[in-house]
Amino acid sequence: MDEATFLKQIRLSFDDDELRLVYADWLEEQGRIEAELVRLEIGLCTMPVDDPARLGTETEFSRLTAGIDEHWKHQVLRVGPPRDDGDYCLCLNQKSELRFHRETQDTECDAWHQLLELIEKARRNGDHEFSPLEEIDDGHRIITLPPEIGMLKDVRRLHLYGSRLRIIPPEIGEMASLEQFFPYTSYQLHWFPWEITRCRKLADSGVSTRALYGNQRTRVGFPQLGSYASLGLTSPRAKRPCSVCRKPFKDKGEFRVWISRGVATDVIPMLVNACSMRCVEQLPRPAKNHISHVHRGGNVIQPPTWG
Ligand SMILES: [Zn+2]
Ligand SMILES: [Zn+2]
């Protein structure tokens, strides 16, 4: 087969990973660097968004995509950094269930390097306040925070106004001094890690409820949870700590649940990645006027009381 035929077939069966792997082998025979990119891309498409190895894979992916032809990327890749897609998240317009955002963090861009430097500087200085996006030129390119955020033990106020964040890593739970958390108008941020409940001093928050629950006309559901195998996802290779008991475990996605609870001044949906049913049962009761039990998402509509 020649490349044009491969590209045509990929266009017709966009989610056929077998075909993509054959294409990757062919690319490798031609000595093309894109071979590795195609394989990494398949990995990213089947990796849970909060897999601890994801950022490492995204880093490799970013490095490899840097010099690749834009047209080729557009034809072949299913994931990549988001385009600057405006303030309001498009997935809130859909009437169907919400899905996890699976765009990738471009770790090659200046914004990402600036963020890492700002975290290091704030850690060294023992800063009480951290507002990185105010100092970064292309802040919209930041869609996740690095695990290093957990090293900011002195930070009391974390401002992330108007961010394009899709995911907050569990390491936020290690920010022991955090008192105020403001991701206000971060419209792509639909959920938080349960680990944020470890920030015992957290008392004040500003979260855009619209980003979490939609609005009165359009309510949004939750991304579906379940064992990774049943969702067509791969299990993380390395053990990861349980969100509840912190013990490292081999995660197969079997005890992942959603829970909505009050954290500081907002009720937020949180993803719990537990190691066992026992740990799920240890969770406290969800907030009043929200789904009264832990759940696994799908066509579940969160019913906060409006008005
Ligand atoms: Zn969204
Ligand atoms: Zn556990």
Image (cartoon, helix red, strand yellow):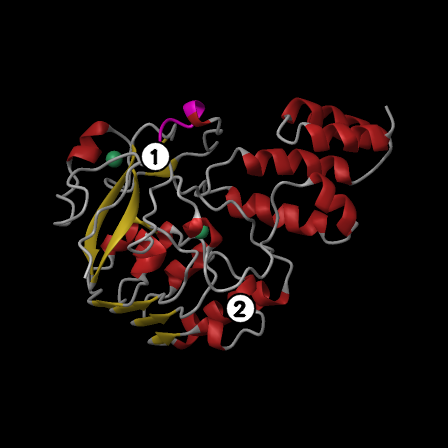
| Quadrant in the rendering for residue 174 | bottom left
In the image: residue 111, left or right of residue 92: right
Q: Is residue 93 above or below residue 283?
A: below
User: What's the mark number on residue 139?
Assistant: 2
Closer to the camera, 110 or 2?
Answer: 2
Q: Main secondary structure of the magenta part?
A: loop
Can residue 28 be spotted in the picture? no
| Quadrant in the rendering for residue 130 | bottom left
Say whether residue 240 is magenta: no
Q: Is residue 50 above or below residue 180?
A: above
* Residue ID at (76%, 39%): 34
- Residue at image mark 1: 298
Please tell me whether mark 2 sits on a helix, a strand or a loop. Answer: helix
Q: Is residue 167 above or below residue 246?
A: below
Q: Which residues are magenta?
A: 225-230
Closer to the camera, 212 or 54?
Answer: 212
